[in-house]
Image (tube, helix red, strand yellow):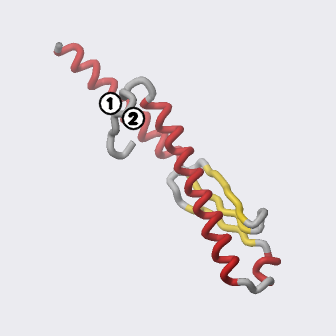
Amino acid sequence: MKGNLQGMMKQIQKMQAEMAKVQAELENKTVSAESGGGMVKAVANGKKEIISLEIEDEIINGGDKEMLEDLVVAAVNKALEEAGKMAEDELGNITKGMIPPGFNIPGL
């Protein structure tokens, strides 16, 4: 019994170290999303932070402030959604097989 517990603790420690490494790497991985046919582009990192936003001049010069605001919100939301999926995939690779299906660990 004691050996099983020690082995399990080693696996948990290894998983924690791997997760910390992946979380640090996610800061440097990016996804991008656009709206308005590419008129607005948002780039987010794996930590769900918007790191850049590009808006084409012609939409700014068009003067439709409300439409521009809607396009910015849409692009940012898409980028954050993609960043979340990327983070889930990366972290999911670490826990695959170690955590039973349907078992939820907060923060994972």
- Residue 50 x %, y %: 57, 62
Left/right placement of residue 78 relative to residue 88 reads right
Q: Secondary structure at mark 1?
A: helix
Tell me which residue sits at (22%, 20%) in the image. Answer: 5
Left/right placement of residue 100 relative to residue 64 reads left
Q: Nearer the viewer, residue 24 or 32?
A: 32
Q: Are marks 2 and 1 in contact (CB under 8 Å)?
A: yes
Count of residue discs: 2
Tell me which residue sits at (37%, 28%) in the image. Answer: 99
Instruction: For marks 2 and 1, give the CA distance.
Output: 6 Å
Tell me which residue sits at (48%, 46%) in the image. Answer: 24
Q: Looking at the rendering, which quadrant does residue 4 occupy? A: top left
- Residue 62 x %, y %: 80, 83
- Specify the label residue 97 is tagged with: none
Q: Is residue 89 positioned above or below 96 on the image? A: below
| Location of the N terminus (image quadrant) | top left
Q: Is residue 22 positioned above or below 57 on the image? A: above
Amino acid on which the number 2 mark rests in the picture: Ala
Residue picked out by circle 1: 13
Q: Is residue 96 positioned above or below 65 on the image? A: above
Amino acid on which the number 1 mark rests in the picture: Gln
Q: Looking at the rendering, which quadrant does residue 45 occupy? A: bottom right
Q: Residue furthest bottom?
A: 63
Q: Is residue 94 positioned above or below 28 on the image? A: above
Question: How many neighbours does mark 1 have within 10 angstroms: few (below 14), some (14-19), or many (20 or more)?
Answer: few
